[in-house]
Image (tube, helix red, strand yellow):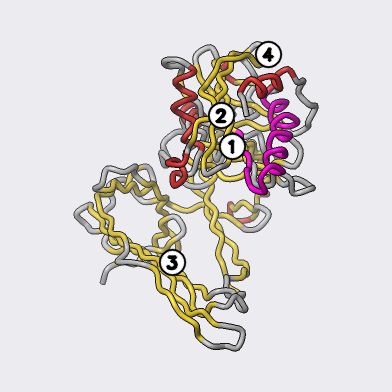
Amino acid sequence: MRLMSIILFLALAPCAWAERLQHGNIIYTLPPHWDTGAIENGIQILTYDPPDDVCEYCYIHLGPGAAKSGSLIDYVTRMGPQFVDEDDRASIDAVQPATMTNLGPLNVALSAFTADGDPFFVFGFELTDRFEVIAFEGYAGYEGEAMDATMATLQEQIIPMLSGLQFISEGAASLMPEPVPGPLEGMWWGWYQYTGLGLDMMIRLEIDHRRLVFWKDGYFYDGTPPTGLAPIDAEAYRNAGDTQFGTYRKIGSKVELTFATGETETLRLIDEGGLQDANRDLFPYDTVADGTRLNGGVSSFYYSGFTPGAGIEGGISSSSSTTFLPDGTYTGESFGGAFGNFVDGGGNLTGGFSTGGDGNATGGRYEIKDGVLIQYPNDGSAPSVSMVIRTDEGLLIDDQFFEAAE
C-alpha cells in the first residue's frame, strides 16, 4: 500500500449527495449509508452501515482542528495517533509518513499507518489560519477481501467527500443560523422511563434524562454546558468540536432548535411553561447558587447476569460513589468486576473465574459556579462538570439524586 497510489484518487470529482452537516469549522456531505456517531475528545466519529456488510467496521473521524502553528506535516504526524484507541497506540506501524499533495485548491498532507492491523489514512488541510484533520479508519479482517473493501470505500466515498469539504473560516456559511434574542432562559429538565434487556435477558426499567439550557441571546445547549450558565462562546465551542449547542427560534407554539451540526429539532410549548420533545415533558428548574457547599453524596450500582445458554453462570457488576464535604473537598471510589462458573451441556460445572480488584479511589476539591458542580481531581486530570438543579425530590447532580448526610 503506497501513498502515491492513494493520491491518484484525489482527482475524482465529488458525488452529489444530499445531507450537509457541520462539525466545528468543517461543512461536509454525509456519504450514503454513513451516520453520525459519538463525539470523543472533540472528534466526531461517523459510522458505516453498508447494505452488503462490506467495510462495516470502517469509520471516519473528523478532528476538532486547531489554529495554524508550525507545519502541516508536523500537525498531521502529531494528530494521527489521536484517532486510534489508546490501548492500540503501541501497535501503530507507519506505512507512509505524511506527504504534501493537493486536493483541488487545498494543500493536503496525507499519511498512512496501521494500528492493531487496521489501516488508517490521515488527511490534513492547510487553511488561511487553521489546520483541519480528518482520518479514515479501514478494516483488515478477513485478509485481502477486507483490505480490498477498505480501498474501494476510500476511493468511492471518502475521497469524493473530502473533495466537497467547505470551511467556515474560509467564508462558507454556517449551517447554524446566527442567534436572535429569544424569550427562553435557564435550565429545563425532563425524563422518561422505558424498558430494556440486560445481558441476562431480564427486563429492566431505564430512565433517560434530558437537560436543555437556554440563553436570551438565542443560544441553547443540550446537556451540561462545559461553562455552565455563563454565556456561550460559540467560536470556542466550535473549535473544541462541541456540537451540542446551537441557536433557537420561538415560532408560535413551537421552539425550533438548530444544532451546530446543522441538524434541527422541533419542541412544542405546553402548559405551565414546559417544553415537549418526542419522548418527554421538560420544565424549568432552579440551579444552585455560586459557592454552595454540599454534605453528602451520590452513588450508583449495576448488576447483570450473563446471557442464558452461554455456558456461564454468574454476572458482572459495577458500583461508584462520591462523597462531598462542606470544606470543599470530595472523595470517591468505583469498582467493577465479573464472576462466573463454566457449565457444560449436561449442567456440570467445569471451572470458574473471578475478575475485579480493590477498585479505584479518587478525590479532590469542588466548587459550584454558574449552575454547575466542577470537580478538580487531585491527580491533575481534567476537571469534570455536572449540572446541579433543585427538584421536588431534592438536588439532582446530572442524572443522580444527591443524598444528604445524616
Disc on the earlier residue, 3 or 1: 1
Rounded to the nearest whole Å, what is the CA distance between mark 2 and mark 1? 7 Å
Instruction: Report if residue 156 lies within the magenta region.
Output: yes
Q: Residue at x 60, y 63 (%)?
A: 192
From this view, report whether residue 156 is shown above or below residue 52: above
The earlier-in-sequence mark between 4 and 3 is 4
Using residue 68 as the reference point, say whether residue 38 is left or right of it. right
Viewer-closest of 158 and 385: 158
Residue range highlighted in magenta: 136-162
- Amino acid under label 3? Glu
| Residue bearing the label numbered 4 | 104
Element class at badge 1: strand
Crowding near the residue tagged with mark 4, few <14, some 14–19, many ≥20 C-alpha atoms within 10 Å: some
Nearest the viewer among 402 and 323 is 323
Point out which mark residue 393 bears: 3
Question: Is the C-beta separation of discs 2 and 1 under 8 Å?
Answer: yes
Q: Residue 99 vs residue 385: left or right?
A: right
| Mark-to-mark CA distance, 3 and 2 | 54 Å
Mark identifier at residue 112: 2
Q: CA distance from mark 2 to mark 4?
A: 20 Å
* Residue position marked by numbered label 1 in the rendering: 119
Mark 3 to mark 1: distance in Å? 51 Å
Residue 153 visible to the viewer: yes
- Does the rendering let one see residue 253? no
Which of the two discs, 2 and 1, labels the residue nearer the N terminus?
2
Amino acid on which the number 1 mark rests in the picture: Pro
Q: Amino acid at mark 2?
A: Ala
> In the displayed structure, would residue 378 be above or below residue 201?
above
